Amino acid sequence: HGRRAVRLAVELEPTEDDRTSSPAVYGEHGVPHVWRVTADPPTIRVFALRDGVHQQVAASAHVIAHAPFRLQVDVGTTGRVGRPARPR
């Protein structure tokens, strides 16, 4: 498994330490996508690697991702993960 093997990192309830240090670590290793999931409020923060830095591109309780793969996630009221999104 090379550097490109990890396409998505997901952090559940990241600590303050994680919020400040992990984006740099993921960026150094070329992880292109990072999601941070919090329970209160139920939110998924979506980050994409751009020019070597992770930038937040979305934040919602319901996410339909197209990269790095198609996936639908809903943490709104139930905190459950949904079915993969259907192609249009």
Image (cartoon, rainbow, N blue to C red):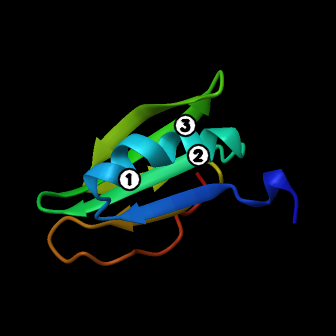
- Can you tell which quarter of the image residue 15 is in? bottom left
Q: Mark 3 or mark 1: which is in front? A: 1
Mark drawn on residue 81: none
Spatial CA span between label 2 and label 3: 14 Å
Mark drawn on residue 48: 3
In the displayed structure, would residue 62 be above or below residue 83? above
Q: Is residue 52 left or right of residue 57?
A: right
N-terminal of the two: label 2 or label 3? 2
Find residue 59 and report its horizontal and vertical position in percent: 30, 42
Q: Are marks 3 and 1 in contact (CB under 8 Å)?
A: no
N-terminal of the two: label 2 or label 1? 1
Q: Nearer the viewer, residue 77 or 47?
A: 47
Spatial CA span between label 2 and label 1: 10 Å
On the image, numbered disc 2 is attached to which residue? 25
Spatial CA span between label 3 and label 1: 17 Å
On the image, numbered disc 1 is attached to which residue? 18
Find residue 41 and report its horizontal and vertical position in percent: 12, 57
Q: Which amino acid, mark 3?
A: Ala
